[in-house]
Amino acid sequence: TAAAGSDDTVKADVTGLTASTTYYYRFSQSGTTSRTGQILTAPVPSSTAPFTFAWTGDSNAFFKPYNVLEQITARAPDMWLYIGDTIYGDDPRSGTGVAASKADYYTKYKENREDASLRDLLASMGTYTMWDDHEVTNDFYGTDSALGALIDEGNQAFRDYWPLRENGGDPKQLYRSFKWGDVAEFFLIDARQYRSSQAYVTEPACLSAGEPTTLPNATCQAEIGNPSRTYLGAAQKAWLENGLLNSTATWKFVMNGPLISQLLFTPFDRWDG
């Protein structure tokens, strides 16, 4: 039974499953039964067996259909990581306007679920998902008090529409990690909720004619390098450092939207911006 205010979405936290096993599921309501989906459970923690995974992001409904996703489904990896911009709440071009409420975000998710390629992918393998900015609005940062209510509503809609377990201590926390045997550990970070503003918000030298400058001058660079600025927030940074230092997995993947690498120019919505 769907909880009130969840846009009729439901979650079942299924326990007692066997490792490295394919399971099938479907939903029934009022005499109607859904198609059958499937997932492969992760191997036992000590497993060193090879596996395959795929990742992608950025699903703007204006550009449907998402035929490119069929390449993932056809290759049948063991699981799929959806690494942000799973909707574009701030783009009106698809015909559903700009999201200004939780109900609007729900509309955006349903609009994307109308896409057959996305539905096929979701039904054929397990999904691990994280958000970036367009689940709320372009380039948002969580310390923007003017967006506080909208961030909360976008966060709730994201959690309702994606298969991630609720955090009992802080339901809004989205960063988490998971292992696939002892081969790999994946760290799904939240690069939005705890970050400082982009440097051009606090330093006028990072602007030119009212727009963020492409090549920052020394004053702007000093603000970019200000040690009081944060991308992950103190708690998440400590969690990530501890996880990377103590992981026994051979490979550690930090799943991230904006580039970590510094380029010759600075679009400020990035780690070095």
Image: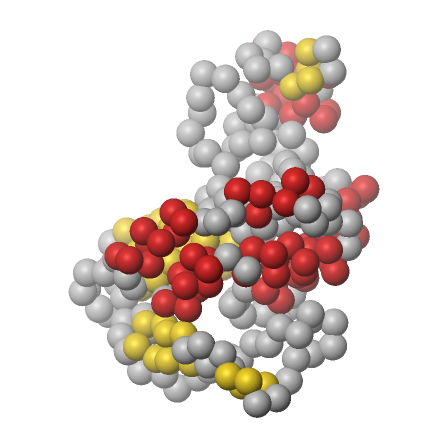
What's the residue at 51%, 47% (across, down)? 64
Occupied quadrant, residue 147: top right
Left or right: residue 56 compared with residue 10: left
Q: Quadrant of the C terminus?
A: top right
Percent x, y for residue 55? 38, 50
192 relative to 270, above or below: below
152 relative to 227, above or below: below
Percent x, y for residue 172? 65, 60
Q: Quadrant of the N terminus?
A: bottom right
What's the residue at 32%, 51% (across, down)? 71
User: Which residue reaches farthest left?
Assistant: 49
Occupied quadrant, residue 221: top right
What's the residue at 51%, 54% (across, down)? 130
Residue closest to the eye, 258 or 181? 258
Left or right: residue 260 compared with residue 32: left
Q: Looking at the image, can residue 267 be seen?
A: yes
Residue closest to the eye, 210 or 61? 61
76 relative to 190, above or below: below
121 relative to 240, above or below: below
Residue closest to the eye, 102 or 190? 102
Residue closest to the eye, 244 or 204? 204
User: Which residue reaches farthest bottom?
Assistant: 31
What's the residue at 65%, 40% (across, down)? 93
